[in-house]
Amino acid sequence: MSSTTIKIIGFALLAAVLIFGGFLLYITITDYKPKETTPLTVNHNQEQMMKHGEPFAITTFNIGYAGLDKDQDFFMDGGTKSRSSSEEQTKTNLEAIASLMTTSGSDLFMLQEVDIDSSRSNHIDEVSLLSNTFSDYSNVFATNYKVPWVPIPVLDPMGSVNSGLLTLSKFGSTSNVRYDLPGKESWPRQLFELDRAFLESRFPVDNGKELILINLHLSAFDQGGTIRKQQLEYLSTYIQRENDKGNYLILGGDWNHSLPGTTPEAFETTQAWPEWLQQFPEDFKPEGFQWAVDAKVPSVRTLDVAYSEGVNFRAVIDGFLVSPNITISGVQGHDLSFEHSDHNPVTATLILR
């Protein structure tokens, strides 16, 4: 090998190192670093007050950025893809999601993985589209994933991500706050990961109390569930503090655990239990709190392959935890066969006692 060739290779390697180093520096400098609590602005706040003794419906739905329909897989779950298959398919999924939400007739919606401006969802502002569709609801958004560029998978990178939690309500709220959850991956991996959080909304009730609504999305791929444990400990402390005040509490969303009172064994599959899914810890449940889940309808499916009935592993990881002063009138998982998201929505009918 000639000295000229060696120099060319050396310069090429040096250029690659400098480019990669510059990229890491840029991502580090621009890294989203929220405070523990961030007050949020609610749009179109409603005047209707919540009433005790009257039933209301609430739905939680991880919409998978309207890109994880039945034909999709996902690289973090063992698949190969990182984006929606097309802009047209993203819009089709989003329209179907909005249609289901309308059909549910819910008074409150807690949505996860809703994108504002992300490569994976063709830069469609899903928050605005859903908020405009439900214009007679208030809407508040909390960011939990904001990265200028996710460079993996190498041949088809996820790209830019701006996503989070969206809560829609027919009732008037007095406060909305983003709470940053503890537990971070090591550098530089955390630069490209979600900044997990929950969205707290406070609603006055006609008996002088408050309903505290928690829209959450816990970690999924943390090794050994270490980060999830920290997040649940943080939630436990928060719950105890608010429960001691006599308030009503509803915690709902994507828990990324197999929830109490449910078992994946209820759903036929040819796959083994995935490494990322853990049983919900038995020692977490606060005294008197109740789980509102539908054990008969799976709320999530594996994403290593496209969806096929009886093949993909399925489980119930979406649902609600409610305080002792709330009656659970009914819970329904909506079996949509994962047509437009890798999750199925769950609706509960509740009564504040």
Image (cartoon, grey):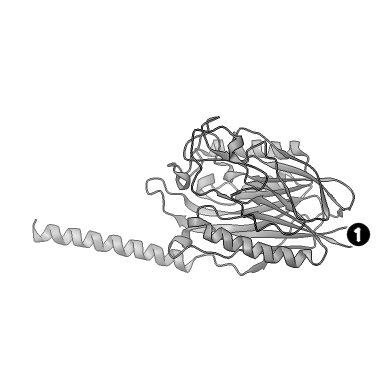
Name the residue at 65% across, 42% down. 262
Q: Nearer the viewer, residue 299 or 201?
A: 299
Q: Which residue is the extreme one toward the front?
A: 282
Q: Quadrant of residue 130?
A: top right
Q: Which residue is mark 1?
A: 207
| Residue 88 x, y percent position in the rendering | 55, 36
Q: Image height check: is 219 above or below 27? A: above
Say few, some or many: other residues with alpha carbon within 10 Å of mark 1 (under 14 / 14 to 19 / 20 or more): few
Q: Quadrant of residue 4?
A: bottom left
Name the residue at 71% across, 57% down. 214
| Residue 243 x, y percent position in the rendering | 78, 63
Label 1 SS: loop
Q: Quadrant of residue 297?
A: top right
Q: Can the viewer see residue 39?
A: no
Q: Is residue 201 left or right of residue 123?
A: right
| Residue 186 x, y percent position in the rendering | 45, 64
Locate the N terminus by quadrant: bottom left
Amino acid, disc 1: Asn
Q: Image height check: is 169 above or below 339? A: below
Q: Is residue 320 left or right of residue 125?
A: right
Q: Which residue is the extreme one toward the left?
A: 2
Q: Image height check: is 66 above or below 168? A: above
| Residue 258 x, y percent position in the rendering | 60, 47
Q: Can the viewer see residue 25?
A: yes
Q: Report the number of numbered marks.
A: 1
Name the residue at 52% across, 30% down. 308
Q: Is residue 216 left or right of residue 17?
A: right
